[in-house]
Image: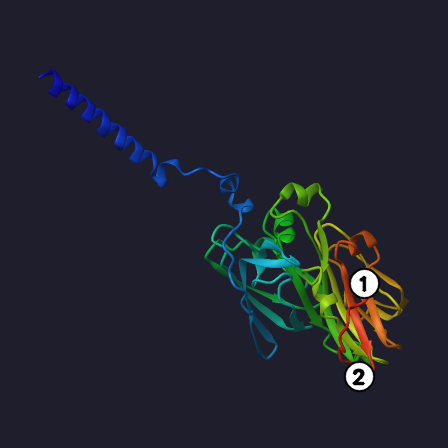
Amino acid sequence: MFSLLNVYKWSLVFAIFTATLSHCSSTDTVKPVHHDEVSSSSSSAISQPPVDPIIRREGTTVYIEMTAQVTDVEISKGVIYNAWTFNGTVPGPVLRVTEGDTLVFTLKNKDSSLPHSMDFHAVHAAPSSKFIDVMPGKEGTFTYPTSSPGVFMYHCGTKPVLAHIANGMYGMIIVEPKAGYPSNHLVDREYTLVQSEWYKEHDYEAFLNGEPDYVVFNGNDYGLVKHPLLAKVGDTVRIYVSNAGPNEVSSFHVVGTIMDRVYTDGNPRNIQYGIQTVMLPASGGAVVEFTVTEEGDYAIVTHQFNHVAKGAAAVLRVTKDGTDHGGPAMSH
């Protein structure tokens, strides 16, 4: 009897112990909490593939549909940033409309965790009704007049704006003057260039008080050096340039030439001649035009050379026929 009682007791203990082990192994009850899971704004989200914006024109009305989404982007060779983006690229797509157009804009928020919005510097609109948040999985449509010509920044305006811009939500919109620029007939080639900064990934303290790890043209520190812009001897080149920041200014400079004309903020009424360096505040823009007279590589930089050392450099390669004959590009 004693031995049977002991067997029963030990069987009961074993059963309880087994059940306890089974319970503790459940992923629902003992899953460790990682620091980056506490706040969705600081964690890496699943990367979504880039998509093209949908753009169509009906007379003077331009319909543009874009996405807010999280996408991994390469900011330096082998360095991937889990970016908050428009349409999966940083900067976002270059948009072009004409002065006097009506812009009908739709933002589809594909980010599953955060609201996003659109702040167009190119329009007159009440931010409290036209730049409002679009919730995750939702979409919003807004209508604006485009009455001022120029080169403008667009960006996510959701609070805190600094986090949304620093994580990659910005781009360029060009409002072409209805009558064109007075120098249109002189221009042989044109390019777009956006300067911006990258900080420690998703680190708001770094955005707020830190120095950028990278300062780049068109999203990374290598693309416009590995694949130079091209021109031929004698060409007049136009560059639409914008400084997205979010924190630093740009001292835009083309090594080896002088800018024949600069349209501040891209407005044809704001014209200057013979400019060596263009100062662009965060969100500032310009149209710059210059002529290349000799073959060779012309570095395009911000003349704040600590930022050049962090990646803010491009190359314009000038050849007799305007094609790239290969070879390493000049560096600064």
For disc 2, the marked residue is 321
The amino acid at mark 1 is Ser
Residue 48 - label: none
Residue 183 figure quarter: bottom right
Q: Secondary structure at mark 2?
A: loop
The amino acid at mark 2 is Asp
Q: Disc 2 versus disc 1: distance between alpha carbons?
A: 22 Å
Q: Nearer the viewer, residue 221 or 270?
A: 221
At horizontal 73% and vertical 45% (from top left) the residue drawn is: 211
At horizontal 57% and vertical 57% (from top left) the residue drawn is: 72
Of pointers 2 and 1, the one earlier in the residue sequence:
2
Whether residue 204 appears in this view of the structure is yes
Pointers 2 and 1 in contact (C-beta within 8 Å): no
Mark 2: give few (<14), some (14-19) or many (20+) Cα within 10 Å: few
Mark 1: give few (<14), some (14-19) or many (20+) Cα within 10 Å: few
For disc 1, the marked residue is 331
Mark in front: 2 vs 1 = 1
Whether residue 183 appears in this view of the structure is no
